[in-house]
């Protein structure tokens, strides 16, 4: 009887480990890299385009809107990483500052934002004029060719 109980317990533990390993593998989330160019447009508002580099070699085109560049020059280059992606399409959405973080880039500031799908975007501005910054709150990213 004791041998049966030990065997049953071992089977239950092994089964639980298999289920946990499968769930962990399924929920694996990727970190990807992004490069964005924002441009001052005189018709249709400010916006930009960029690229998402997912799993090291897949490149996905991005369109950005909802950004006001104000009096800043014509172009701003941003670079950074995106976390919590399960698929490239998870980058799409409207971004807000994450948990009290800032959505302002410029100088040494890094914007940390999150969309409604849980993707976390960290961006910094490539060299900008000192004292200039851009608030990215409300920036919307859509994909092309997903």
Image (tube, rainbow, N blue to C red):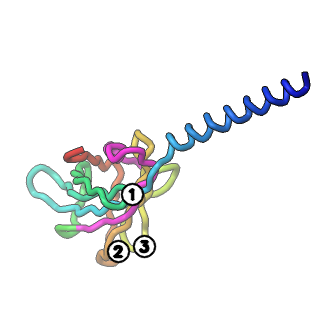
For the stretch drawn in magenta, the main secondary structure is strand
Task: Give the spatial CA distance, label 3 vs label 2.
Answer: 10 Å
Assess whether residue 114 is covered by the magenta stretch: no
- Residue displayed at 30% across by 50% down: 139
Is tag 3's residue or tag 2's residue first in the polypeptide sequence?
3
Q: Which disc number belongs to residue 108? A: 3
Is tag 2's residue or tag 1's residue first in the polypeptide sequence?
1
Q: Choose top left, top right, bottom left or bottom right for residue 93.
A: top left
Secondary structure under tag 1 reads strand
Q: Choose top left, top right, bottom left or bottom right for residue 92.
A: top left
Q: Which disc number belongs to residue 32? A: 1
Secondary structure under tag 2 reads loop
Residue 116 pos. (x, y %): 40, 39
- Whether the residues at callouts 1 and 3 have beta carbons within 8 Å, the answer is no
- Whether the residues at callouts 2 and 1 have beta carbons within 8 Å, the answer is no
Q: How busy is the neighbourhood of tag 2: few (under 14 within 10 Å), some, or many (20 plus)?
A: few
Q: Nearer the viewer, residue 146 or 102?
A: 146
Image height check: is 139 above or below 78?
A: above
- Residue displayed at 42% across by 73% down: 108
Is there any visible trace of residue 4 in the rendered image?
Answer: yes
Q: Which disc number belongs to residue 131? A: 2
Is there any visible trace of residue 103 in the rendered image?
Answer: no
- Residue displayed at 20% across by 46% down: 145
Quadrant in the picture for the C terminus:
top left
Looking at this view, name the residue that lies furthest to the top: 1
Residue 84 pos. (x, y %): 46, 49
Task: Give the spatial CA distance, label 2 vs label 1.
Answer: 29 Å
Secondary structure under tag 3 reads loop
Residue 72 pos. (x, y %): 23, 67
Quadrant in the picture for the N terminus:
top right
Q: Nearer the viewer, residue 51 or 98?
A: 51
Q: Which residues are magenta?
A: 76-97
């Amino acid at each position: 009887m004791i041998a049966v109980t030990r065997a049953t317990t071992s089977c239950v533990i092994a089964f639980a480990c298999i289920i946990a390993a499968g769930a962990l593998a399924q929920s694996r989330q990727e970190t990807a890299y992004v490069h964005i160019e924002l441009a001052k447009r005189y018709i249709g508002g400010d916006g930009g385009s960029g690229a998402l580099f997912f799993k090291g070699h897949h490149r996905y085109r991005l369109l950005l809107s909802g950004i006001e560049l104000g009096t800043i020059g014509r172009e701003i280059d941003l670079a950074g990483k995106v976390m919590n992606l399960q698929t490239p399409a998870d980058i799409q959405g409207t971004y807000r500052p994450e948990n009290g973080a800032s959505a302002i880039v410029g100088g040494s500031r890094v914007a940390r934002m999150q969309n409604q799908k849980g993707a976390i975007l960290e961006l910094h501005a490539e060299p900008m004029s000192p004292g200039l910054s851009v608030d990215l709150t409300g920036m919307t990213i859509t994909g092309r060719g997903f």
